[in-house]
Amino acid sequence: MMQMKKIVGIFCLSILSLGIFAFTYKTQLHKSKPFPYKQMGFSKEEAAAYLLNRFTFGPTPGQVQAVANEGIENWFYKQLESNDPDTSVTNRFNSLHLDAVDLSLTDMVNTYPNNGVIVAMARKAGIIDKNDTSISKQEYREKLREFMLQRGFKPMAALERQLIVQKIIRATYSNNQLQEVLTNFWFNHFNVSLTKPACAPYILAYERDAIRPHVLDNFDELLLATAQHPAMLAYLDNASSVSNNNPVEAKRLQKLAFNNNGTFKKRAAAEGLNENYAREVMELHTMGVDGGYSQQDVTTLARILTGWTIYPMFKNSPANEQIQKLTPELMEKRGFVIQNGFLFKPNKHDDGPKTFLGKNFPANGGYQEGVVALEMLAHHPSTAKFICTELAKHFVSDTPSNNLIQQMSNTFLHTNGNIKSVLITMVSSNEFWNKNNERAKIKSPFELAISSVRATNAQLNMPYQIFNWCNKMGQKFYYYQAPTGFPDRADYWINTGSLLSRMNFGLAFAAQRIPGIQVNLLALNNFHEPESAEAALETYSNILLPTRNNEQNIQRITPLLHQEHLTQKISAVQSKSNIETTNNEIVMQSQAMNTSSTPASLSRVVGIIIGSPEFQRK
């Protein structure tokens, strides 16, 4: 134990030294020279538009000029602080009765229990009988619904809906846009999914408590917060990972292993080490698949993290009642650790000595060796390269240079993994301001939908409709099943039929055919209606795509202005399976449509612009 404490002490001292260096380094970065946009060929307004497209969910009307006037460096550094009041977001939460967003994790679990918990409680209370085959499905549901009302429970679907709506509201209306963009980025990086019922009750709190507060902190804080949150513990199964190399647990499992008649129990055999989280935390969260670790390191890390599980928050459950009998003093003496839904169970932990990534961990390391192992991962050079590559791919281009990644990695290592400093290094580089990267990134369906709302000053009275359309366009966010998260590259989003789906969204959005979304298109042009469809196309292209050279895009989409039954024809073309996917797909398909003299309404013009290839770029 003394040896372990010595290791931890040395490690903490090293981190403290890094922290002091990081503070000095960050101070120097904040005093660095202006961003090199002028020498790379950007005007101040073009630079402002570029920053707004990459570090927000899209500029709002007039924002490009406002940021240019403020100074793009000033705007960016203010966004790094992420402390602007968000009264608009709060007011919308209140008007939409999003009561769950401020609930504690414990209250959330006890207000929105999952279906399995409700069924178990109803059976225990005698409300339903699993052996009663005469009851109809309708009667079964009615009994469960009545039971939930009596106990004050709310359906899990209502919590999931609030999770989705709050994300849409924050992305659309928050003043702290960089924080929201990074929340979206890091959630995808540390993905969990509503498709796993055991994970679902915790996801709103996971994004709120483990992701959003740490998106601009040091990386180790973000890593530890996600590792210990019930959502991740449930999603990647670490909550059920226990060790047989523990005298207390080995004895318990031995008792469970056999039935009274001497036959072996399958359930007992299934209990033991689970390597899912250990593998993914190295492959996807930190070092990367080629980071230099072995399968033995995966197994060892899984052993190190045994006993990391979920605190039983559901009141009156057997596990909760059992743990409530223990006093805090007794729990501390026995080595238990409790914090915000996380529980370390010393009797489930592997007490043996271990070697992880070449570092020896003495026996009886307990909870702290898990923290040390995650800190090792957070500060590993492979992690620096992997994380900086992911950030550069998201904010610069799908294929950032090795030189840029190396610059960012050096900053990561020299600042204790400080995310703010890494972003400053990136935005201060010539590569970020390379004109070839200006329009190199493609919006995801979520980014497209939110940027459309922001660009038009639309009002979202029924925000959930945005989710429905994102789902139609191929991004059912919060439901991506794989731990990889959605791929962050153009060829994933621009696939067969995707541009046609986006055009359909643009037309429906601008024509106000999406319920609960209000758009005043004339207000964007000071209530002046252009004299023709062609004039409207030019005017509103400049409004929705400020500072860009829109001439080529206008040429591409002009043939769509007078298409009769445009929406129906696009839907018909989209249903064909032999569509070739390019950025010009919509325009090429328009050549097969008969033109007519039907005048184009302003809503159609704006819808076509939103669905155009140029608006898909950020």
Image: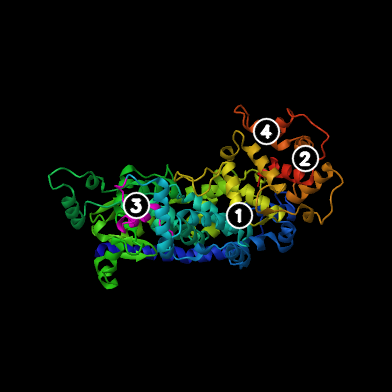
Name the amino acid, label 2. Answer: Ile
* Span of residues in magenta: 112-132
Residue at coordinates 82% horizontally, 55% vertically from top-left?
527
Q: Is residue 105 above or below residue 608?
A: below
The numbered mark at residue 89 is none
Q: Residue 403: image x %, image y %?
A: 56, 46
Q: What is the secondary structure assignment of the residue under circle 2?
A: helix
Residue 554: numbered disc: 2
Q: Residue furthest right?
A: 531
Calculate the distance from the C-alpha at mark 4 to the C-alpha at mark 1.
29 Å
The three-letter code of the residue at mark 4 reads: Glu
Comparing 618 with 118, the one in front is 118
Residue 170 image point, x, y percent: 59, 59
- Between the residue at mark 1 and the residue at mark 3, the CA separation in whole angstroms equals 34 Å
> Which kind of residue does numbered mark 3 sit on?
Asn
Q: Quadrant of residue 17 in the image?
A: bottom left
* Label whose residue precedes the other's in the sequence (1 or 2): 1
User: Disc 4 or 1, which lies upstream in sequence?
Assistant: 1
Mark with earlier residue (3, 4): 3
- Residue at position x 33%, y 42% in the image: 295
Q: In whole angstroms, how far apart are the C-alphas of marks 1 and 2?
A: 30 Å
The N terminus is located in which quarter?
bottom left
Q: Residue 463 bears which disc, if any?
A: 1
Q: Nearer the viewer, mark 1 or mark 3?
A: 1
